[in-house]
Structures are given as C-alpha cells and as structure tokens.
Amino acid sequence: PAAPSHDKALGLLLGGALGDGLGAPFEGREVVEETQLAAWEAAATPLVHTDDTALALVLAAHVAERRDEHGLDRDALAPEFAVAWRAEPWRGYGSGTPHVFGLIGAGVPWRSAARATFGGQGSYGNGAAMRVAPVALVATSLHHAAELGRQSAEVTHAHEHGQNGAACQAAAAYLALRSDRRHRLDAVRFLQDLTRVVRSRLWHEKFDRIAELIRHEAGPAHAARALGNDVSALGSVPLALLAFLTRCDDASMAIRYAVLGGGDTDTIASMAGALAGARNGARAFPEAWTARLEAAEPLGRLADQVTGPLAARP
Ligand code: R7I
Ligand code: MG
Ligand code: MG
Ligand code: MG
C-alpha cells in the first residue's frame, strides 16, 4: 500500500503528543472536572510532553530510518530507548521501565532485561502501547502493524498483556490511518478486525464491552469504570480505543473524552489522540493546541520523512 498522506501521518504524531500534553496535569486523578480541562485547553503555556511522547519520538525515528525495509531492529531499538530515558529521566517514567533501561544501558540483552522486572514476569504496564502508534506509518498490513507493535514492545515489556496492548494500539492506528473520514467508521467492524490480530480472551471481552458502551453512548466516567483507566495495558488501551471510536469524527473531542475518564490521563489521551489524528489528519486539531507542542518540530520532520520521497540508497 501507498504511504499515508502527510496530513494523516502528522495527525497521528501530533495527536499522540497533544493527548499526552493535555492529559499530563491530570494523571492519577480519578475525577477530572470539565471546567479544569477547558481552562487547560485554553491556556497558552507550552504542552511539555512526558515519557509517552519521548519514547514515541524514538520509535518514530527508528521506523522512519528503516522506512524502505518496513521493519524494526530490536537490538538497535532497545539502546535507543535507554539513551532517551538516560538523557531525560524526569519525563514521568513508570517504576519498572527505568530499571529495564538501566540494565540495557549496562549491556544486558533486552530479552533478559525485560524479564528482570516484577518477579520475572515482566511488565504488563501500558508503556509499550503508549509509544507504539508510529509503527503503523510503515506497516504494510493490519497483521504487520500488530506484529511491529509486538516486536517494539518485547524490548521492555515481557508480559503478554504489555505486548498485546502494543499490538492492539498499533493495529488500531493502522486501521485509523487507512480509514476515510468521508465515510462513517463502522466501530463493530473495527473491533472485529482487532479481534483477528489480538488473540486473547481477556482482550476480546474488552472489545465486546467497548461495543456495548458505544451502543449505550456511555460517558467517560461510566466508561472508565467499565473498562479501567489505570497504568496497565489491559486497563487503559480499551478506554483509549473507546474514546476514539465514540468520538471518531471529532479529533479534539476524542482527546477530551479520554482525559475526562481520569486515571492514567496522559497515556489514555495520547493513545486516543494518535488514533483520532490518524483518521482525521493534523488539520483537525485546533491550531492553538498544536502551536503549544514542545515536540511540534521534530514530529513535523518525522511526518515529512515517512511520507516524502524515499531517499536514494548509496
Ligand atoms: O509500562 P510503563 O512504562 O508505564 C507507563 C506509565 C504511563 O502512565 C506513563 O505515562 C508513565 O507514567 O508510566 O512502566 P512499568 O513500570 O513497567 O509499569 C507501570 C506500572 O504498572 C508499574 O509501576 C506497576 O505498578 C504496574 N505493573 C505491575 N505490577 C505488578 N506486577 C506493571 N507490571 C506489573 C506486574 O507484573
Ligand atoms: Mg507519561
Ligand atoms: Mg507518569
Ligand atoms: Mg501515563
């Protein structure tokens, strides 16, 4: 398939950063007041990003670099993540990931490092899902997107849920990129497609619940109770998916819905924002928001790199 349009590629990248920056002040709050969110949306201060976008930038650069191979190299990717964490450890990282990055930086192979946390089972956190959307920009099929997502997760998240979360979000980003905003998005069909690439009963149960919440036009607080809004992959990726699917034609509303769900707001809104931007394009977000993004320039260059003409190989 052809590369996605520049507007959709940029939308995916900026949407992720917008959700991160707009959600970050509310991370960990169970209740987010609409008036507080509206005030933060209308503010003019820079949207400083957290670990979510810091690592998405690394992964985006990694796949952009290998664009003509449509793949990723885990042995190179692991130290690239570790270097980014080492340079800016203050970006709000979880507890397990810095440990993994420290080991990788010390030369421990990523496969062992990723198994060294949480009693040897590895992390089921959402840290692999939160950074994964850019792999969809170079994926050649739905299955390929899920596979790239899974591979990118393996270097830090050994637990199957950490990996399933990344596969799910990567596949959803692929579907969102390929969807045409001039046509209604069929949420049931979208979830059925995800069922084919995320093969886990627990995840399928979440997909069923998402469909039901959409049918009932559930609000964010109710949805957060039904699906979870915590730092686990299984307890956050589904809410992000719902925020996108239920507000799929209004990119700003998708982010707003995700933040109002509370809990891991930067991460859930970042994942929802990437999907919303992938479907609706960068121009769907208010200019006043994107102008505040700390990472607007590097994200713009990455969108150019993945959609521009292929560089000639020596
Ligand atoms: O997955 P990870 O990078 O976390 C991402 C989150 C996002 O909200 C970011 O915005 C940032 O704030 O952090 O980091 P991990 O430390 O691997 O996982 C996150 C949390 O999930 C951990 O701190 C644990 O509380 C929990 N967790 C587990 N607890 C018990 N057993 C993850 N895996 C396990 C586990 O196997
Ligand atoms: Mg964060
Ligand atoms: Mg945090
Ligand atoms: Mg978070």
Image: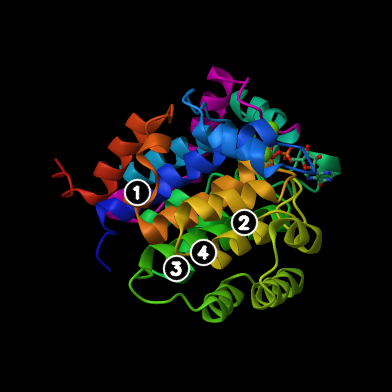
What amino acid is labelled 3 in the image? Answer: Leu
Q: Helix or strand or loop: what does disc 2 sit on?
A: helix
Q: CA separation, marks 4 and 3?
A: 5 Å
Whether residues under marks 1 and 3 lie with C-beta atoms below 8 angstroms apart, the answer is no
Instruction: Give the magenta part as a residue range.
Output: 67-95
Q: Helix or strand or loop: what does disc 1 sit on?
A: helix
Distance from mark 1 CB to nearest ligand 2 atom below 8 Å = no
Q: Which residue is mark 3?
A: 175
Q: Nearer the viewer, residue 201 or 45?
A: 45
What amino acid is labelled 4 in the image? Answer: Ala
**Residue 88 in picture, x, y percent from top left:** 56, 20
Q: Which residue is mark 1?
A: 282
Q: Quadrant of the N terminus?
A: bottom left
Q: Nearer the viewer, residue 79 or 16?
A: 16
Residue 240 shows which numbered tag? 2
Query: Within 10 angstroms of label 4, few (less than 14), some, or many (20 or more) residues?
Result: many
